[in-house]
Amino acid sequence: MSSGYLTSPLMLIVNTLFDLYILLVLLRFMLQMLRADFYNPVSQFIVKLTTPPLRILRRIIPSVAGQDSASIVFCLVLIYGKFLLMRALSIPAVHIGGVMAPIGGASYAGLLLFSVADLIALILTVFLIAVIIQVILSWINPGHYNPVIGLVNKLAEPVLKPIRKFIPPMGGLDLSPLFAALLIMVAKMLIVPPIIHLGNF
């Protein structure tokens, strides 16, 4: 039985666990930055799971411009640790924003750049998913509110609001989500590959 037989499921477990927690830490930062309702049950769930390590990091890393920079640093540390662990499992490369990043042969500085690219790709993906969910919910159950919808609206609004200034609803049809999704995907294609390219040196 080849070593790859166990490596693949192990990689899936490692990747999933790391990605879920990285997403929680990132959501905490984004919701705090967007001044979301932290008494929201979903917000409280995120806060409880992410507070212990962040409380320690905040003693070392001060906030910048009123933003919780410790959360972003923690995200980068987690992503970097994930790549190191995957490299230890003999994983040669990973997909970051649709681009293959060769973590197996990258330097430690290169891995850091890959971590930055992965974090940027994740931020853009969160915005994209928030926009898509908001559109779906507006079709299925317009006007209805629950804690998840409130947070989704908070995440989607910074992307949709500027676009609506230039493309207002026409005939009751709001095209801003379509343009927002397109711009997010284009941004990912323009931003992520050059950072990964720098990490290859």
Image (cartoon, rainbow, N blue to C red):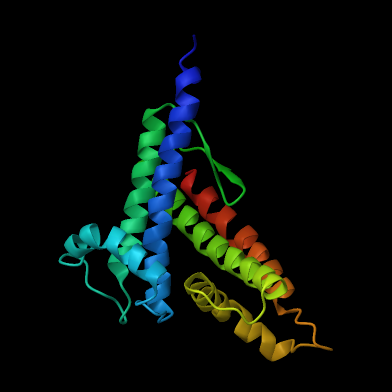
72 w.r.t. 1: above or below: below
Percent position of residue 3, x then y? 45, 16
Is residue 107 visible in this depiction of the protein?
no
The residue depicted at 48 percent of the width and 35 percent of the height is: 12
Percent position of residue 102, x then y? 51, 37
Q: Quadrant of residue 39?
A: bottom left
Residue furthest to the top in view is 1
Percent position of residue 163, x then y? 67, 83
34 w.r.t. 89: above or below: below
The residue depicted at 42 percent of the width and 65 percent of the height is: 27
Q: Nearer the viewer, residue 35 or 149?
A: 149
Residue furthest to the right in view is 171
Is residue 184 visible in this depiction of the protein?
yes
Total marks shown come to 0
Percent position of residue 62, x then y? 22, 72
Q: Nearer the viewer, residue 6 or 116?
A: 6
The residue depicted at 47 percent of the width and 73 percent of the height is: 147
In the picture, measured across the screen, residue 165 lies left or right of residue 57, that is: right
Q: Quadrant of residue 186?
A: bottom right
In the picture, measured across the screen, residue 151 lies left or right of residue 185, that is: left
Q: Nearer the viewer, residue 107 or 153?
A: 153
Q: Quadrant of residue 35?
A: bottom left
The residue depicted at 35 percent of the width and 63 percent of the height is: 45
